[in-house]
Image: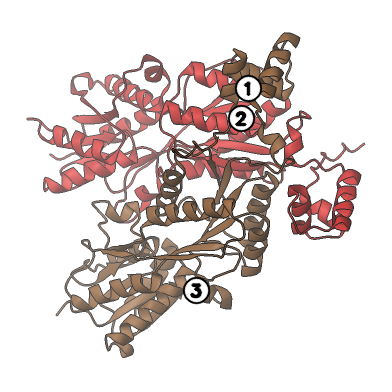
Chain colours: A brown, B red
């Protein structure tokens, strides 16, 4: 016997077809807007009753669903995030779920505002991309609404996580550079002081991965980390500092592609060739890393797969809020391009 | 006499404070989730009544507001759109409105899906950024919910528009190149056949502005337009075609920065120097135009101002749905960088 087709949500379009009126007319009746005749109202109300249509507004009270998933992005400028988003939407294709993005966050207060707004509008589930909030706050959100956290390495009994293996990614870069004959390989990290974030955030994991890889290659004495920020300006400042050293590094591993942009700027200003005098690598394999004039060696995080896994876990959790939490860790790959080459003699 | 303070929306946080419980507890009661004791329910329900809190879910039925604004973006990868978004959110700061983005569109069907979803969830207003849908469809959306359209030059009695003056922007580029001694200035446009879109879309206006500027500078015979698409691949193909001409152009005006990226790639492949042998200019002043290794001459559309104006108009229209429609046109500025220089002898 064939399994029954999954129940499809009745939409405003179905109501309009059933009542033989336009969707505008249905909307007018639902909003009590003027311009809908009494006959129209009666027809639409009857269609609503017959089809059992529940406008989103009735959903929460009846403990139904709004078929809405909120995705909180820290910064829509980071060209890595669209990959994650594509993964999420492709996994949701063919379902009745609609994704809405909550933008404009990059701090705990803003994150609280966006997550409250998502909860307040009855969203069925939330995906938090690289949130900076405390674990306690994340647990709070997850206690109210099904939640998946992307890019944080901590684990929790109430939410699922999907991360890239940042330690492995950093190791790919260091091994690649060492294989090209580099020994003085420096790293520019994002400055972090909060102990939870040091344990959970990707930036801290990348710095840790760098140190571990250097040690395992017998380059412990060459470990050289400059602590600035994951911004272009942070890369510029970090590179200025490294280029000022008496024995300057022959290779720089920037913790993110945007940081590498600042490094390239500082290196060009110093009149040094890339990769002739100095090799530069980033992380995230953003769209601009692939642009011809930049051609930056980077690490690909499989953003699409990260997003698809997050959506899958969220749908599972919406169905069963009390299943044990799941941690998915994906393997990154190295994308060598023109900014890395053989170490100078 | 002082004007009365604008009424502030009662939020879930106010209810929690008033009931002296956590916001989690309020959420649980609102969602009828298990884990809320009967006493808790009573307390929360009383606070809700006393403060007159209306969860979003009750809003539509009562013809109230959801304090939600939907912004439809055609492509979150285009680095110009975050500027618009910043303008929108900065104008809404201090209000109770929350912005949610509807992503993943770039076609009429997807746009219909996203706008229906926004209407279905009772959003108070919608900003459509560079929609590709028909005018009839835009009018339909605007007849149901207050709407502002960004980047389309058509006018409508039911929605407001905010655009850049694309004709003026194209003229800035052509004049800049002519001032550097160029005469053979070619243009790469986005291929367009639909007559409404030819009249309304920014790409068609830029091509028109290019032609007009060439004529007004006495360069009618040098007009040379290649029709591909506003993508990196479109720029690459267009440049290949132009570089194959017997008299190849000394300057290329690409209709968008992303197109210029493809042009730079093709020019580098052909072993030509920029701007020594050929000058290249884009449009949009995206973040990567400013990156050191690229340093692309471009046109800045004042995205922040576009967004701020759109938000202002939308708030006005939410207050008064029947006021006459408004068209705002903003002036772009030229940002000269290293990819344009004196014409070769």
On whether disc 1 and disc 3 are found on a single subunit, the reply is: no
Gap in Å between the C-alphas at discs 2 and 1?
A: 8 Å
Instruction: Identify the residue position indicated by label 2 in the image.
Output: B119
Q: How dense is the environment of label 1, judged by Cα within 10 Å: few (below 14), some, or many (20 and up)?
A: some
Instruction: Identify the residue position indicated by label 3 in the image.
Output: A191
The quadrant in which the N terminus of chain A is found is top left
Q: Is residue B341 visible?
A: no
Instruction: Identify the residue position indicated by label 1 in the image.
Output: B144
Label 3 residue SS: loop
Judge whether B289 appears above or below B201 on screen.
Answer: below
Whether residue A28 sits left or right of residue A177 in the image: it is right
Gap in Å between the C-alphas at discs 3 and 2?
A: 43 Å
Which residue is drawn at the image coordinates 64% and 16% (left, top)? A25
Mark 2 and mark 1 residues within 8 Å of each other at the beta carbon: yes
Q: Nearer the viewer, residue B231 or A149?
A: A149
**Which mark, by number, is residue B15?**
none
Query: In the rendering, at what x and y percent does residue A325 appear?
Result: 55, 65
Which residue is drawn at the image coordinates 42% and 57% (left, top)? A306
Query: In the rendering, at what x and y percent does residue A114 appear?
Result: 63, 51
């Amino acid at each position: 016997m064939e399994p029954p087709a999954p129940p499809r949500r009745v939409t405003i379009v179905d109501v309009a077809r059933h009542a033989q009126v336009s969707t505008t007319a249905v909307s007018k009746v639902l909003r009590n807007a003027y311009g809908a005749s009494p006959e129209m109202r009666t027809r639409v109300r009857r269609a609503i009753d017959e089809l059992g249509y529940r406008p989103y507004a009735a959903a929460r009270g009846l403990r139904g669903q709004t078929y809405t998933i909120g995705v909180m992005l820290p910064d829509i400028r980071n060209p890595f995030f669209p990959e994650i988003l594509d993964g999420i939407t492709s996994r949701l294709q063919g379902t009745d779920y609609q994704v809405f993005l909550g933008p404009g966050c990059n701090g705990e207060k803003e994150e609280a505002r966006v997550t409250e707004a998502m909860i307040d509008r009855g969203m069925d589930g939330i995906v938090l991309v690289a949130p900076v909030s405390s674990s306690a706050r994340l647990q709070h959100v997850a206690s109210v609404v099904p939640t998946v956290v992307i890019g944080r390495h901590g684990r929790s009994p109430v939410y699922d996580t999907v991360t890239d293996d940042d330690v492995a990614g950093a190791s790919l870069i260091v091994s690649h550079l060492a294989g090209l004959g580099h020994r003085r390989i420096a790293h520019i990290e994002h400055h972090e002081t909060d102990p939870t974030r040091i344990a959970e955030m990707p930036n801290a994991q990348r710095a840790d991965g760098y140190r571990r890889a250097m040690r395992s290659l017998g380059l412990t004495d060459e470990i050289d980390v400059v602590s600035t920020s994951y911004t272009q300006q942070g890369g510029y400042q970090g590179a200025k500092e490294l280029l000022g050293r008496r024995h300057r590094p022959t290779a720089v591993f920037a913790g993110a592609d945007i940081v590498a942009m600042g490094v390239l700027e500082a290196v060009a200003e110093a009149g040094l060739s890339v990769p002739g005098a100095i090799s530069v690598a980033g992380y995230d394999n953003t769209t601009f890393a692939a642009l011809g004039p930049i051609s930056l060696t980077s690490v690909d995080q499989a953003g699409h797969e990260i997003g698809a896994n997050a959506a899958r876990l969220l749908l599972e959790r919406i169905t069963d809020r009390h299943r044990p939490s799941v941690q998915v860790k994906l393997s990154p790959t190295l994308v060598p391009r023109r900014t890395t080459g053989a170490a100078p003699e």
